Image (cartoon, rainbow, N blue to C red):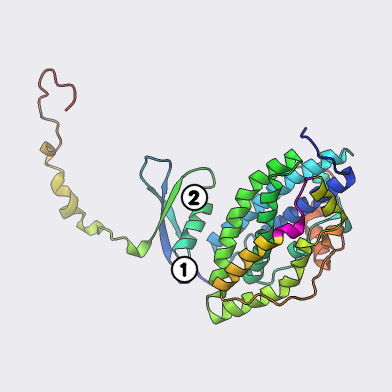
Amino acid sequence: MSAVAAMPREAHVEYLLRLADNALVLGQQLGALVTRGPELEEEMATANFALDYIGQARFLLSHAAELQGEGRSEDDLAFLRDGFDFHNVLLVEQPSAHFGDVIVRQFLFDSFYCEQLRALTQSSDTRLAEIAARGVKEVGYHLHHTQAWVIRLGDGTDFSHKRVQESLDRLWRYTGELFDADATDRAASEAGVGPDPASLKPAWDAVINATLEEATLVRPAEQWMDGGGKQGRHSEHLGHLLTDMQFLQRAYPGAQW
Amino acid sequence: MSNESWPLFEIFIRARSGLSHRHVGSLHAPDAAMALDNARDLYTRRGEGVSIWAVRATDIATSDPADAAELFEPAADKDYRHPTYYEVPDGVENL
């Protein structure tokens, strides 16, 4: 058992669930695209990303479940929680109508998540630090690949430029939540469990600006930002996603194969 | 979209330092940088390599199988080109 920092247990569990649910929901989103990739090779990349996220989610959920100490397993947390008990940011639950949406959602999130994981490798929660050290290499590659696509779609044909700019404009309002700190974030930051989200913004801005410039895309103007996912207030999209993801365990409790 | 719009790349992987790159297969990609990404996902997921080369298939010059007789068969009856018939003098350990 790893050393656990001086953070109230309930807040610590919720902090871990935020991390876990981001990875779990995005992993489910990408997994659902298998057989629908634009090309076989890109489908492999997407499926690999999905597996990376699900792997990270499993480690984080196990850690959260043990810390919670109520005898629940990672599977219980993944398949038997309701939407309002999920703590992922709204960005990762947004649907994708086309490949440009998939790439932009991925780009906006991974550019944040990569910085977050890098900071978490210094966490006072040593088990979390180990999970982050493993994940940061995976997500570093996701970001590399996703940036490459943003640049190719943005600086590609008129059609691809227009579509990916629309994706960017549509998803931008979900990026504010990434950097807004609430009581749970502040408790994590004070206990050295996680970074102050606002401290990740300058590095994120730098990656976003450099990539968008190369992609000839326009960074959306400052605007009203949506939020609430971290606290359990979700869009309707999460419900549909959970219906798919949780169906088997809900319909056949305890089913194994 | 169809694969007609994406060129074919041949992929070579170096298994570890000191070995040469070996051909492992081929894939489609929009350009060379993406071919490296795709090769990473298709051919190195299980620790198969430490270096990747991607070469556009159309950039590889190949010998024509129809020319095999004149290209390769003349070597078949010249076994004196193998150093098999040299007598090794006494006392020479390495030749």
Identity of the residue drawn at 80% across and 38% down: A4
Label 1: how many Cα within 10 Å (few below 14, some 14–19, many 20+): some
Instruction: Place residue A179 in its image quadrant.
Output: bottom right
Q: Do we see residue A78 in this rendering?
A: no
In this rendering, position of residue A184 left or right of residue B4? right
Instruction: Place residue A178 in its image quadrant.
Output: bottom right
Q: Specify the amino acid type for callout 2.
A: Tyr
Q: Describe the element under mark 1 as helix, strand or loop.
A: loop
Q: Circle 2 is placed at which residue position?
A: B43
Compared with residue A250, is residue A225 higher up or lower down, i.e. above or below? below
Please provide percent x and percent y for residue A86.
84, 55
In space, the residues marked 1 and 2 are separated at their CA atoms by 19 Å
Compared with residue A156, is residue A142 higher up or lower down, i.e. above or below? above
Q: Specify the amino acid type for callout 1.
A: Trp
Please provide percent x and percent y for residue A74.
79, 43
Q: Circle 1 is placed at which residue position?
A: B6
Q: Describe the element under mark 2 as helix, strand or loop.
A: helix
Task: Provide the residue span drawn in magenta.
Answer: A192-200
